[in-house]
Amino acid sequence: MLKYQQIANEIESYIERHHIQQGEKLPVLESLIKEFDTSKSTIVKALDVLEKKGLIFQVRGSGIFVRRKKRKNYINLLSNQGFQKDLEKFDITSEVLQLEVHKPSEIVAQQLHIDRDQDVYYVKRIRYIEGEILCLEESYYNKAVVPYLNKEIATTSIFQYIEDGLSLKVGFSDMYLQIGKLTDKEASYLKLNSGDPKLTMESIFYLTNGTPFDYSTVIYNYNQAQFYILGTGI
Amino acid sequence: MLKYQQIANEIESYIERHHIQQGEKLPVLESLIKEFDTSKSTIVKALDVLEKKGLIFQVRGSGIFVRRKKRKNYINLLSNQGFQKDLEKFDITSEVLQLEVHKPSEIVAQQLHIDRDQDVYYVKRIRYIEGEILCLEESYYNKAVVPYLNKEIATTSIFQYIEDGLSLKVGFSDMYLQIGKLTDKEASYLKLNSGDPKLTMESIFYLTNGTPFDYSTVIYNYNQAQFYILGTGI
């Protein structure tokens, strides 16, 4: 982990430990440099990370203020880390329904920018939050990027494996949201009724170098799906 | 408008005009400096704006690549500009059902960080996209920040009025999403059936100085609500 990222994590812990509330001021730059025993440029970079994450906002000439106002039981929609990492405070488990290597459909090949004769890992999972069904997920991983997956990895966190096991860096994502009604089949997976509300989220995840590696479609249980987004403005 | 924001807009037009596709490279920095006849620092700042907007991504040592892959009829969920500005390509209209000044409820006062004896503008609107009902919106504006609103403003774009008319700068927002079933009353506003799917989005909008000025609850028509998010990673 880079120094400024480590310091960013430390400042995040500091905010929690000191119960600094939304709208309250952080110590001035000089105090932070002293407190975290690091250089000005590292602190400035760390603060930029925290601003991007929506944890703080900086007002020129006025100070650094704490922003995050999480709501209990809401999931961060913008975390590119997959659930596992973001939901550290939630208990997330997965049941793997299917895990296989095959050739992609036209749509999948297109989303992953690959040819139809290249291999993809197809993973179908039910994901649970605190023991309740959260969503049905179908993911396609470009096998050229993610050469190996097994049931054990898919049962825990695929993204953590990608970052820690394969040393790849998840960069950004495109997400598409739609609301609709559950089909019979979807309802049976989620143990809901046909016609009940659903949120469908399609995501394409990219490495920092711009390579798409994961195309996934997730259908959420409307009883469990509550999301927050900390928009960082334009 | 600041110089680098203007250049950012120009680069955005440039990308569209030259039909630069997702994953394709932008000209190198030196060419951009020449093309837009400006300084290196302005170009660098402009590129940062475009990266934040999810339009490009920069790979160190490799170049600047175009990112945006809009889907037709999907709405940008992360625009803090209100719909009007983001949906330039959509025809958005509003029907004002109610517009009045009153004292806030406990919840509204809390979200806007004001006392219960301060005034808020309450605006209730039906918003249409291409003539179809998009959503039912109830918004509360802190009157100390937005001292005047009228039906004409509320029929067009309140955010544009706030930025252009009041010269305030919209900074960031907190958003909370939930999926559920429409009540009888909500269904009648949206001309849907009771029990149909709904997406409820609560937002708190802040000025760049951190002052919350708008707390709104929007209930979307599931037939019209399709969103995209260009996540910019962490």
Image (cartoon, coloured by chain):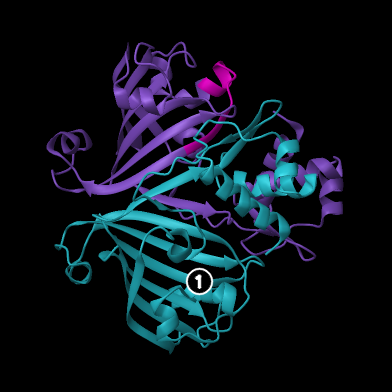
Chain colours: A cyan, B purple
Q: Which residue was labeled with disc 1?
A: A159
Q: Is residue B131 above or below residue A98?
A: above
Q: Is residue B152 left or right of residue B42?
A: left
Residue located at (62% from left, 69% from top): A169
User: Looking at the image, is A186 positioned above or below residue A232?
Assistant: below
Residue A200 visible (yes or no):
yes
The quadrant the C terminus of chain B occupies is bottom right
Q: Position of residue A124 (x, y in %)?
A: 35, 77
Q: Chain of mark 1?
A: A
* B141 shown above or below A148: above
Say which of B108 and B84 sits in front: B108
The mark total stands at 1
* Residue B103, percent from left and from top: 32, 13
Q: Is residue B17 magenta?
A: no
Residue A234 in view of the camera: no
- Residue at 20 percent across and 66 percent down: it is A183
Left or right: where does residue A147 sit relative to residue B105? right
- Residue extent of the magenta highlight: B162-173
The picture places residue B161, in percent across and down from the top left corner, at 51, 20
On the picture, is A158 further left or further right than B188?
Answer: right
Q: Tell me the kind of residue under disc 1.
A: Phe
Where does the image place residue A222, in percent across and percent down from the top left? 25, 55
